[in-house]
Image (spheres, helix red, strand yellow):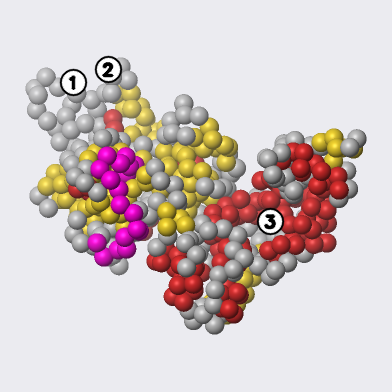
Amino acid sequence: MDKGSHLILRSKASETSSILDSLPRGEKVTVYSISGDWAKVKAGSKTGYVHASFLTNSNPDSNAGTSTPVQTTTKYVNVDKGSHLVLRSKASRSGKILASLQRGEKVTVYTASGPWVKVKARGITGYVLASYLSNADPDASTADDSNNSSEPTPDSTVTKYTTADLNLRKGPSKSASVIEVLDKGTAVKVYSEEDGWAKVEIGGKIGYISTNYLTSAAKQSNGKVTTILKNYDLSLDEFANIQMKFSPQTDTNERYIRSDAIKLTGRTTGVVQNGSWHIRDGAGTKNHEVGETLKEGTKVTILSTVKGDDGYTWYQISYNKAWKNATKNEVKYYLNPNNFVSDPVRSLQFLKLTSTANLNATEVNQKILAGKGILAGKASAFLTAAKQNGINEIYLIAHALLETGNGTSQLANGVKYNGKTVYNMYGTGANDGNAVQNGARYAYQHGWTTPEAAIIGGAKFISSNYLGAGQDTLYKMRWNPDVAATYGYASHQYATDIGWAYKQVDEIYNLYNLLDNYNITLEVPSYQ
């Protein structure tokens, strides 16, 4: 750090923790451990945490030119079983890959540079991401779980929750433009965490949020969850074969290409080189080709680097073709309820949309509808609409919030039609080019001359199509297992996107998460 500056020693590895001391430039410290951006150190008689990037191996003001080594520590690679940690030539994802370290492998830690640490492993010195190291062997019975990393492994994603209202930004910077503001307790899908920023996905939108406001623990509530199993005379493999006849689509980023196919052009970007290459749904040649090849010169974004089951290094990539034919393995993944039922967010694709959430109108007005434009204070109308039409209240409210832009749309706030002001809260009939006029005409024909009438009357049409046909979960709307099991073919499915039901649940979860009292009924399919 600059001359005249001081390094703050804090009680915890957080900018908000109390200050223990202010360390001058050149002061000698003993380093106990490094985790992410923070180093646990002893300075004099005080033990605390400092930003690791402001530590160096030698006294910056020494004239002797001799190094005073920072105390080394021993750590262990802590990634998921079957994953590997890449050792690089420099503290960057663009650094050359020197080795692929196994889970539990012991490394010697020297210094930190932001989220990276300099280590020695197998006699090779290089850099790894500190968040994938722990103080104890993750597979040892005596491992100290409190020190194990909770970050996502290089080839996986995790669900985390926001601990405050915060901005979702287009880039990892406070100067990047804001996509939307996320409420406290929002569930997000985390792809990566680096330099204090997390790359996340919420409702199909990908952006960046501060890692300081993320937690792995969902909020505890008084909600009651009931699970019902529904058995089908159908195997997952048979069900997948039925679906494959109807060209299911995916925009998943689970796409992999061997690293020697890519010439790096930046830290996370590259172009295909040396002809055309197959891409696969997993890292390694044993995984399925997805029916596409990337031609030389195709630009790709590199999401992660993993060791393939064939011994080669592979890149998980995203590229500029949005929709792709799904493989059978990918279809089976989304068909299989066991992949989602234990996840408090993704399990809501099995939410029985015809079951009551048993909500309190006052709580809904205060915690969900406050500040939502024309919908503010309308909880009683939603609860009445839900009861009269046999629709889950949260699902109905989520639908209205989406269609009205949180109560701000022109149709929601009233449109003159044949001399009367009419309202449309679900976008019913708003199609065929002139959405506002067509939606207003539909509202006029059905007498929706007050916001309450539009909320209650429009709910009938929400329930009449899929819910009325017995497809009363998002999962059944997408896959319709009743028809598949009875007739052996696919019919009356809402979307071709295999991840459609998976993607719809974020808003439903986040609305439930705002409340303290509610009921959830899940109907989970069970296949042979």
Left or right position of 129 against 415? left
User: What residue type is disc 2 on?
Assistant: Lys
Mark pair 2, 3: CA separation = 59 Å
Mark pair 2, 1: CA separation = 9 Å
Q: Which residues are magenta?
A: 285-302
Q: Can residue 513 be seen at all in this image of the molecule? A: no
Left or right position of 342 against 288? right
Q: Which residue bears the numbered disc 1?
A: 61
Q: Which residue bears the numbered disc 2?
A: 3
Q: Secondary structure at mark 2?
A: loop
Q: Position of residue 48 (x, y in %)?
A: 35, 39
Q: Which residue bears the numbered disc 3?
A: 395
Q: Position of residue 22 (x, y in %)?
A: 35, 27
User: What residue type is disc 1 on?
Assistant: Asp
**On screen, residue 455 above or below 11:** below
Q: Which comes sooner in the sequence, label 2 or label 1?
A: 2
Mark nearer the viewer, 3 or 1: 3
**On screen, residue 210 above or below 139:** above
Q: Secondary structure at mark 3?
A: helix
Residue nearest the observer in this picture, 297 or 131: 297
Q: Can residue 483 be seen at all in this image of the molecule? A: yes
Residue at screen point 69% across, 44% down: 432
Q: Which comes sooner in the sequence, label 2 or label 3?
A: 2
Instruction: For the residues labelled 2 and 1, say whether their Cβ atoms are less than 8 Å apart.
Output: yes
* Furthest residue toward front: 432
Q: Which comes sooner in the sequence, label 3 or label 1?
A: 1
